[in-house]
Image (cartoon, rainbow, N blue to C red):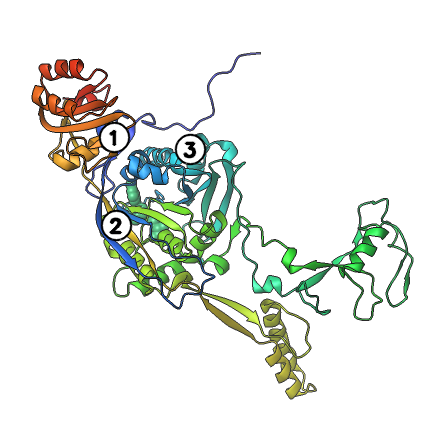
Amino acid sequence: MAKHAGRLELTWTDKDKALLSAGDGRYDYTFVDRADPRVREVRLLHEVDRVEAPIPEERPDDLPEPTRENLLITGDAMHVLDALSKTPEWAQKYVGKVKLVYIDPPFNTGQAFPQYEDNIEHSIWLTMLRDRLRQIKPLLASDGSVWVHLDDAEVHRCRAVMDEELGESNFIATIVWQKAYSPKNSAKYLSVDHDYILVYAKSADAWRPNDLGRSASMDAAYGNPDKDPRGPWKPGDLLANKPYSLGRYPITTPSGRELDGPPPGRYWRVSATKLREMDADGRIYWGADGSNVPAVKRFLSDVRGAVPRTMWFYSDVGHNQTAKNEIQSLFPGIDPFATPKPERLLHRIIHVATHPNDVVLDCFAGSGTTAAVAHKMGRRWITSELIADTASAFAKPRLTRVVDGDDPGGITKSTERVAATDAGLPEMTPAEAQEFGRLLGKVAKDRDDLDPATVRALRAATRTRDETTVTWHGGGGFTHLAVGPSMYDVDEDDGDVYLSTAATNGPWSQAVAAQLRFTLTPDHPVFCGARGRQRLAVIDGVADEIVVGTVVEHLGPKERAVIVAKVVLPEAESRLAQSAPGSRIKKAPRDLFPKRTVR
Ligand SMILES: C[S@@+](CC[C@H](N)C(=O)[O-])C[C@H]1O[C@@H](n2cnc3c(N)ncnc32)[C@H](O)[C@@H]1O
């Protein structure tokens, strides 16, 4: 047998490289070496402001508590994700803690939208997506999941990349969302009705979805004709087709009717002894007069909710126009955000994949739907948006209104159509009641021998109505952060790297601390960071003997110094080696980023 080599993978131009965006909020990307300091540096997140509101008194106690520890971040997801997972202060809070990542990145459809360009080359798109997945992975909780929303443009390639990055065995499902309400008659070929959502778990062994809530129509099949204190139930068949050695015996019903046994080729599901036990426990129904074939009572309290399925219809989760309407009613008078998603779609995803207070991350915020819905559902959230204008025109004001209880749209109210059947009619689902009304109207039109008063009474008895519940009242808060500037400039001609004009004083020390994974120690007069027994001193200037002397003076017993300076004199190095063995001195940027021409 020939020996095989290689593995199944999708390849593309410059797959081994990294991408840098122009940094001016546009989709202007260039491929660079993965060792490029502008890729490897950890950017700082600066606080812009804080939005907060008290919990309103009218909020019922059974709703999840509004959350406060939430982040809206303006900046490139590339820097946001690194800042969250590599800066010790953020990493402590979020590494391994994110339960759900939902991303709705630009689809690469070749269209140009008012707020962003979507015509990135496939290889740029794939590199961008692959790198974001790599950065998301350390943030995911062991029982977390990643949901990527796409259309036909990249879904097939993205699935291959997700197999590579997250593991083929962690693939959970592809959800098909019916996004279109009506056909596009201008379609060149077929009118596309749906998008895809690829779902992967961090570990398919650990991840479990929550059942969907049961709707009133599903519950309408349950009644309680015998007023069982265990609540509503519905009759289940006692007959089975599968052979069962104890499943053929005669039964005498409570009214004295003799049943010879199950019909030929069929079996009672339970043995005679078990049937007696269940009957004694009130779990068998014999019909109103006690002479029916016995049925097993299946209690509503024992059944699970609906298992989530992969086809999501707009009647349940909204369509594209629903989403546009939601944005338009929040921001009347301005051009709506081009590609929002409906709140009910996010509600279902967040419901299936998280519990209250879990952390939800969406690093392609757009109009902020994920964060808005997560907030209304009592989840903590982090969301980031590259385009500052999009964040300031849509995501931030929207989230502020959610916190202030000033967003009546989306999932703030939930409306369910319920049947108002009574007057001795059998229980009907809303759909059945509507159908009954329709047929009744049809029959009554053709027949003049029906009593109009009876028809009217039947109509009234089967009318359906909408029942509305308010599930969000406001409260909680979020911090608005912005990604700080790069600390490095690269000479495009020779590739040499220099410190940028932003690399001064406090911001530079903090960036160096983040880069070297030191936790900030802002109150210390000399050291700006600590990592185990190491203490970090960042010098915005020359490190000489005097500087080294001061640093060493402040070291505690068994502590070692890491000194980073823009210029390092030779005598500083020898003095440090003598007076604090095990300590190190680094010249920036050269010694911060190995394997590069860095000056
Ligand atoms: C399809 S939209 C998301 C829409 C969002 N789901 C909603 O309901 O409004 C994609 C968004 O990702 C943003 N984006 C693109 N590249 C980004 C990046 N590198 N970092 C952060 N955001 C980015 C775009 O500016 C755009 O607003």
Dot 3 and dot 2 residues touching (CB under 8 Å): no
Residue positioned 31% across, 39% down in the render: 90
* Lateral position of residue 536 relative to residue 233, left or right: left
Compared with 340, 364 (above or below) is above
Determine whether 229 is above or below 368 in the image. below
Mark 2 crowdedness (10 Å alpha carbons): few <14, some 14-19, many ≥20: many
Q: Residues within 10 Å of mark 3 (few under 14, many from 20)?
A: many
Q: Residue furthest front?
A: 557
Find the distance from the CA under tag 1 to the CA under tag 2.
Answer: 27 Å
Image location (x, y in percent) of residue 193: 46, 53
Q: Position of residue 260 (x, y in %)?
A: 92, 57
Amino acid type of the residue tagged 2 in the rendering: His
CA distance separating discs 3 and 2: 32 Å
Q: Position of residue 238 (x, y in %)?
A: 79, 55
Instruction: Identify the residue under disc 3.
Output: 161
Q: Nearer the viewer, mark 1 or mark 3?
A: 1
The span from disc 1 to disc 3 (Cα, nearest Å) is 38 Å
Picture quarter containing residue 502?
top left
Along the polypeptide, which appears first: circle 1 or circle 2? 2
Q: Which mark is residue 530?
A: 1
Q: Dividing the image into 4 quarters, which one contains the C terminus? A: top left
Q: Contact, CB < 8 Å: mark 1 with mark 2?
A: no
Residue 92 falls left or right of residue 29: right
Q: Amino acid at mark 3?
A: Val
Q: Residue at x 19, y 21 (%)?
A: 591
Mark earlier in primary sequence (1, 3)? 3
What amino acid type is highlighted by mark number 1? Ala
Please tell me the numbered disc located at residue 480.
2
Question: Which SS class for mark 3?
Answer: helix
Q: Residues within 10 Å of mark 1 (few under 14, many from 20)?
A: some
SS label for mark 1 = strand
Number of numbered discs visible in the structure rendering: 3
